[in-house]
Image (cartoon, rainbow, N blue to C red):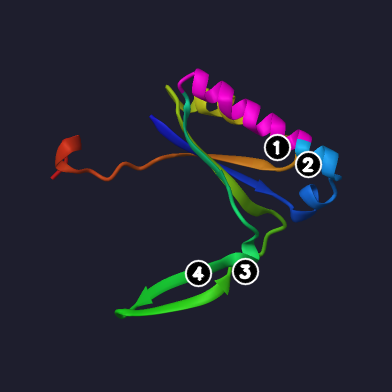
Amino acid sequence: MKYVCLVHFAPEALSSLNEEEKRALDARSIAYNEELIAGGHLIAAEALQSPDSAVLVKVRGGKVSTTDGPFAETKEQLGGFILIEARDLNEAIRVASGIPLAALGTIEVRPIYEIPTPERGGP
């Protein structure tokens, strides 16, 4: 089963690190990705740019509107994701607990919803 591990952290969690600490965190993250590849868990992993580079897109009544965003009332921001393959939720949680940024923020583990298609036995 596929799970996405959404990496949330407060902006100051990273900005408070010096360059050496940032490089060490990057190295630990890359090493963990390699472990996940070797264990057959990693499907994809990407870091995201700052939320101030995001654009929110909505379609209402056939009209597209965009706004700068996001403007959620939260102290943490979405900083990246890791798409994994895991046997079940317990294994996905174990995998997520190894993500180095879990020590600075929060990892949200969420199962992927696979849209039913004829190839998957759907309509």
Which of the two residues, 8 or 22, is positioned nearer the viewer here? 22
Which of the two residues, 16 or 70, is positioned nearer the viewer here? 16
- Mark in the foreground, 4 or 2: 2
Q: Secondary structure at mark 4?
A: strand
Q: CA distance from mark 4 to mark 2?
A: 29 Å
- State the image coordinates of residue 65 (x, y, percent, origin top left): 43, 79
Badge 3: few (under 14), some or many (20 or more) residues near its Cα, within 10 Å?
Answer: few
The answer to whether residue 98 is magenta is no
Image: magenta residue range: 24-40
Residue at label 2? 22
- Mark in the foreground, 1 or 3: 1
**Contact check, label 4 and label 2, Cβ < 8 Å:** no
Residue at label 3? 71
Residue 99 visible to the viewer: no
**Contact check, label 1 and label 2, Cβ < 8 Å:** yes
- Say whether disc 4 or disc 1 marks the residue closer to the N-terminus: 1
